[in-house]
Amino acid sequence: MAVYVIGDLQGCYKKLKKLLRLLEFDADRDRVWFAGDLVNRGPDSLKVLRYVRSLGDRAQVVLGNHDLHLLAAYFLDTRLKPNDSLNQVLQAPDVDELMTWLLYRPMLHHDIDLNFSMVHAGIYPGWSLSTALALAAEVETVLRGKKPRSFFESMYGNKPVRWSQDLSGMDRLRFITNVFTRMRYLHPDKSLDLTAKGAPSKASNSDVMPWFEFRQRAIKFNRVAFGHWSTLPTGQYGHCFALDGGCVWGGQLTALRIDKKTPRWYRLSCA
């Protein structure tokens, strides 16, 4: 049995199927993890959702910021952004079933046997793996509760920027959500900078560092696969593996085989 992690799809269904053929993926034998952002910007978000859902427990998915944006649009019936490509999903006859399925995807996945975790954006410095899993569960519980709409009404925003165990209510949930689905850079005091998006060599603010360069409790003895950062070259950064090759922008769709002692990379051109 092979286990693969695949980076951000963002509606690139044809490229996904081509990559799976390259991997010789066998759905009866192999397993595939998806590092979030299944949807948006690309041409076939609906096909991606239907296909990944059809894999059942052979697929593991974590929520990304674009997945949450789709859920927010569904629950709030809000106007989409000009560059969104989500109407095909929202107008689909099976939208209710798809959104219920998506709502039950986790924020963070950990496989103790493989010693691998997967998250869309990152894990906050100072959080142990057990703490990160517990905080992810706090958000998941609210999403799957009786009032997910109230969560999405207050989800958007960059504040608070600093973590404290004393944070409560939506401030706490928003910070946790931003870490798992939007984080790239932090300041030396570990406050989030959610405005910087470029590669580390081109960061406009020299006072910030990539999250994975901080001393990390969660990744000291654990490996982490993540997506979200298309301007960061795909590859290994210590115990962290960056998987977003920017396929939707004409870059690459990237997969990492993680069931072997040494992970193996696969890259498909999306040009």
Image (cartoon, grey):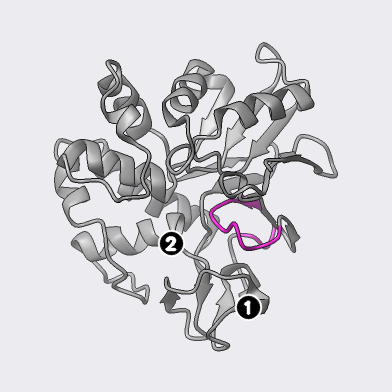
**Residue 106 in which image quadrant:** top left
Residue 30, compared with residue 4, is above or below; it is above
Q: How many marks?
A: 2
**Residue at x 34%, y 73% (from the top left corner):** 164
Amino acid type, residue under disc 2 in the picture: Val
Residue 40 in picture, x, y percent from top left: 42, 41
**Residue at x 74%, y 63% (from the top left corner):** 238
Residue 202: assigned label: 1
Residue 109 in picture, x, y percent from top left: 52, 42
Which one is closest to the eye, mark 1 or mark 2?
Answer: 1
Question: Relative to 116, is 64 on the left or the right?
Answer: left
Can residue 116 be seen here? The reply is yes
Question: Relative to 144, is 113 on the left or the right?
Answer: right
Q: Which residues are magenta?
A: 219-233
In the image shown, does 147 or 47 lie closer to the viewer?
A: 47
Residue 16: assigned label: none
Query: Judging from the image, what secondary structure is the residue with disc 2 in?
Result: helix
Question: Relative to 29, is 136 on the left or the right?
Answer: left
Label 1 neighbour load within 10 Å: few <14, some 14-19, many 20+:
few
Query: Judging from the image, what secondary structure is the residue with disc 1 in?
Result: helix
Q: Which quadrant holds the C terminus?
A: top right
